[in-house]
Image: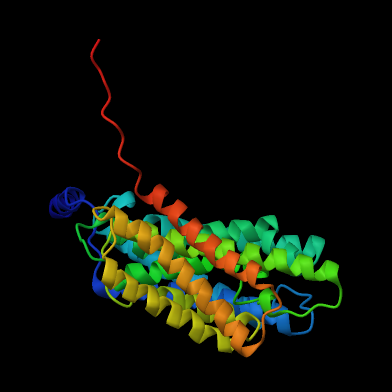
Amino acid sequence: MRVRELTRELFRDQGPIPPTRRFEWTVVALCTWLMAGAYLDAWAHRHLARLETFFTPWHAILYSGIFAILIFLGTRALRNQAHGHRLDQALPAGYNLSLIGAALFGVAGVIDMIWHLRFGIEVNLAALISPPHLLLMLAGTLIVAGPLRAAWRRPVSKAPWTAVISASLLLSMLTFFNQFDEPLVNPYAATASATPATIADLQQLGILGIMVQTALLTGIILYLLSRFALPFGSITLLVGLNGALLGSLEQNFDLIPVAIIGGLLADLVMVWLRPGPQRVVALRVGAFLGPVGVSALYLLFLALTRGIDWPITLWLGAIAVSGAIGVLLSYLTVHPPLPALDVAG
């Protein structure tokens, strides 16, 4: 008994458990399973006959992913606690919130089932912003951001690939709940319409979609750059994974390579400018060129393949606005220097 007590005290003094490579890649794989299940469920709601029950194969894939995460993190935490670690240090730093998120996701799933039984299966926009689904979004965000939080707390200057994938899954969680106005899901710029009133509505939705996607994507990238140097290919992976998930919802598979190429161009801009907190001008220039390049490539592809319904003033303005959004977000990432305060007197 005395040896066991001494062992427990030894572990208590060691602080949080450092994550192993195998642990982190397992979490990344399970989070990818979860996100793929969410988008597959959204695809089913879009393309199959109306789903009138909570118990579907698509929900099974989604919730089996969440339970796999809960079991993996929960058993690891219990095992480490049994070896003497405090409960708040039973998982590597950054992963406690992922475990809490997994438990919350399960609770939200039960609430969602009760909600469906009481009010029916939501469709279209109501399905995305129903209270139980927003609770699922919160839980999912806590889960998939685990590897990113863990990397943030470690003394590393370059982002590990686990953090990059985690950031992409975080972006995909946000775009999942904005899928009704995502450019890769609904290419409104290439949509013909019968009436002038509808054309105006589609133009507004199209511009808003480009603006919101620019803000989400650029915000995530600038957040990473505020802490890490990114290895080449990071933005290609981040944008490409998110683009593949979004493009699959309405089977716009021809738009997925556009996202990948846009990410590659952004990576090349990164190599050229080397933006970061210590290179503020380069950061602001990159925050402008990246969104402009991605938006221009997207609209150019639509013009060449599907035709653009917008006047040139509108789509050129959309490109300029996306660059302006990037620059504004860069000021949230790196603030202008403050003047020296006069403390005399």
| Residue at point 27%, 72% (across, down) | 271
| Residue at point 73%, 65% (across, down) | 125
**Colour pattern:** rainbow
Q: Position of residue 43 (x, y in %)?
A: 65, 80
| Residue at point 42%, 76% (across, down) | 263
Taking depth in this image into account, of 301 and 179 the one nearest to the observer is 301
Task: Point out the image quarter for the C terminus.
Answer: top left
Taking depth in this image into account, of 4 and 193 the one nearest to the observer is 193
- Judged from this view, the residue extending furthest toward the right is 195
286 displayed left or right of 40: left
Q: Position of residue 188 (x, y in %)?
A: 69, 74
7 displayed left or right of 340: left
Q: Position of residue 150 (x, y in %)?
A: 31, 60
| Residue at point 42%, 68% (across, down) | 290
- Judged from this view, the residue extending furthest toward the front is 313
Q: Is residue 214 above or below residue 195?
A: above
- Whether residue 242 is visible to the viewer of this picture, yes or no, is yes
Taking depth in this image into account, of 79 and 291 the one nearest to the observer is 291
Q: Is residue 111 above or below residue 31?
A: above
